[in-house]
Amino acid sequence: MQTHFTPEQLTDPGTARANEILRACVHCGFCTATCPTYQVLGDELDSPRGRIYLIKDMLENNRKPDKKTVKHIDRCLSCLACMTTCPSGVHYMHLVDHARAYIEENYDRPWSDRALRWVLAQVLPYPNRFRLALLGAKIMRPFVRFLPDPRLRAMIAMAPKMIPPVSRNDDPQTFPAQGKKMRVALMTGCAQKALNTDINDATIRLLTRLGAEVVVAEGASCCGALTHHMGKENESHAAAAKNIRAWVREMDRGLDAIVINTSGCGTTVKDYGHMFRNDPLAEDAARVSAIAMDVSEVLMKLDLPMGTSKETKVAYHAACSLQHGQQIKTYPKELLKKAGYTVLEPADSHLCCGSAGTYNLMQPEISGQLKTRKVDTLEALLPDIIAAGNIGCMMQIGSGTDVPIVHTVELLDWATGGPKPPALDSAGKSDIKVPILR
Ligand code: SF4
Ligand code: SF4
């Protein structure tokens, strides 16, 4: 694609990167075939190619973002299916991230949008505030139909019925390994600590059992993804900088990997090197990104025992951030199969479930349509359990089905000697069997 940025415009590193990306696009339109919003809405401007044109026009003309452009960029899930499909290697993620930051800086949103986005940015990344908000949502649940804004109704509906107690495993500390083979730092995250403490607990048990010493680094918390995807660069960079400093201190003591069990966060941490490329923290950020790994990548390096029974049927939901953002497509399935589960995949496994960070709260209608599709294809497999590697997908899909949904690591932990995932008992599925005969 031809671009017409002036030399002066290209002195801005964000614009220069956008120019590189735009020039790689050959407008072939292959990406439209796998774009969930194009499939749901059928509008070219809700396809990757359409959004690329809108972004090009906005940036080239130094134009204040208009309502139409913002609407179509806001409707993008950042699922990155388009990056997997694109034959020309267009880095849509960096382009849309830049567009979102540009919009945040130059567009006057209606006050209700600004207020909602401010609340989300001030609550979700902070586990204690988020817990309080979840409690508030629980109290508001009986009155949900009286709320005027569908986004507020979506927030209340998404809140879990049970709020788990705080897990002390999320505090800074070191968990010794059984027969130490490696030392890793676990990113315990932010929203996940308020929504589901079973995932980090299972990850720590599983990794230490398989020989990885696990450290929860002092000072590390939210990765910044939630605010990053809202274009709030100051907030996202501040959160990321804290993590970088915390993990670099641990790297100086010897660290083989930074383990992330929330794939949405993993995609962002792996991109810290790019986010901080013009910052004094550039070198440290690149070091952190270089050893950031999804938990499935680390588990592939450890010796997971073989399971024996194939009785338990697991429908695996591939989170977009894992399959498209990090291009990790086979590891979770290989691990589940090795542990003894029968793994099934839905027909539309490349498509987003509509969760996408805060998307299900800000675009509830499109998100709801994607959820219904995804739940239908998963339930059609008649699974005992649904597994996913991202808390956002778990909340989204879990709110639309009675089939219990757990994190992949919870099933691997159970198969190798850990407790049964609590979600199975609370879903009344006490008859599901652990695949390894112990
Ligand atoms: S598939 Fe790639 S090159 Fe083709 S239109 Fe989409 S982004 Fe552009
Ligand atoms: S990130 Fe997803 S929703 Fe956005 S343009 Fe690409 S495929 Fe479509």
Image (spheres, rainbow, N blue to C red):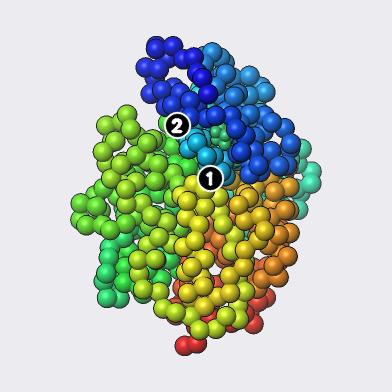
The reply to whether discs 1 and 2 touch (Cβ–Cβ < 8 Å) is no
Q: Of the residues tagged 1 and 2, which is closer to the observer?
A: 1
Q: Is residue 226 left or right of residue 273?
A: right
Secondary structure state at the residue bearing disc 1: helix
Q: Amino acid at mark 2?
A: Glu
Q: Residue drawn at (46%, 62%), measured in percent from left and top?
A: 331
Towards the viewer: 403 or 216: 403
Residue 4, label in figure: none
Towards the viewer: 110 or 412: 412
Q: Amino acid at mark 1?
A: Thr
Q: Which residue is mark 2?
A: 233
Residue 341 point in image, percent of width and height: 55, 75
Q: Is residue 175 left or right of residue 57?
A: left
Residue 190 point in image, percent of width and height: 47, 50
Alpha carbon distance from label 1 to label 2: 25 Å
Residue 382 point in image, percent of width and height: 71, 70
Residue 84, label in figure: 1
Local crowd at mark 1 within 10 Å, few (<14), some, or many (≥20)? Answer: some
| The residue carrying mark 2 has its beta carbon less than 8 Å from ligand 2 | no
Q: Earlier in the sequence, mark 1 or mark 2?
A: 1
